[in-house]
Image (cartoon, rainbow, N blue to C red):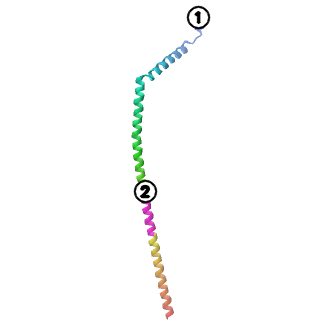
Amino acid sequence: MLNCLKNIDWKKTGIFAAGVAFGTAGIKALSSDDAKNVYTQGTALVLRAKDCVMKVVTMVQENAEDIYEAAKNVNEERAAKKEAAEFEDAEETEEAETEEAVEEFKEVESETEE
C-alpha cells in the first residue's frame, strides 16, 4: 500500500485540495450577509447613476429638439424670403417687359401716323 502512495503527485493533490478549500470559503464569503449588503449597496449606486445619466440624456434630447425646431424655422424663413425675392424679380421683369411693349407700341403707332 505504501507503494501506491509513493506514485501520487502530492504537489498536484495539494493544489487541488487548496482550490477546493478556497472555493468553499469563497462561496461562503460571497453568500454571507455582509457580501449581500455590499451587492445591494453597489446595485443601488448603479441605479442612482442610471437616474442621473437619464436626466442628462433627457435634457440633451430636449435641447436637441429645440435646436431642430429653430433650424426648421430658419430654413422656412429663408425659403419664404427667397420666394418673395423671386416673386419681386418676376414682377420687375414683367413690368419691364410691359414698359418695353408699350414703348414699342408707341413707336409703331407714331410711325404709322406719319
**Residue 55: quarter of image:** top left
Q: Which mark is residue 2?
A: 1
Q: Residue furthest bottom?
A: 114
Query: Which dot, 1 or 2, sits closer to the camera?
Result: 2
Instruction: Report the amino acid beneath label 1.
Output: Leu
Mark 1, secondary structure of its residue: helix
Q: How busy is the neighbourhood of tag 1: few (under 14 within 10 Å), some, or many (20 plus)?
A: few
The residue positioned farthest toward the top in the image shown: 1
**Which quadrant would the N terminus be assigned to in this image?**
top right
Q: Position of residue 16 (x, y in %)?
A: 53, 16
Quick check: 4 above or below 28? above
Q: Residue at x 54, y 14 (%)?
A: 13
Q: Which residues are magenta?
A: 70-85
**How many labels sit on residues?**
2
List x then y, in percent, for residue 44. Answer: 40, 33
Instruction: For mark 2, give the secondary structure.
Output: helix
Is 111 located above or below residue 16 in the figure? below
Q: Mark 2 sits on what residue? A: 71
| Circle 2: residue type | Ala
Q: Is 50 part of what is drawn in magenta? A: no
N-term-proximal mark, 1 vs 2: 1
Residue at point 46%, 20% (across, down): 28
Q: From what the image shows, is residue 107 above or below residue 88?
A: below
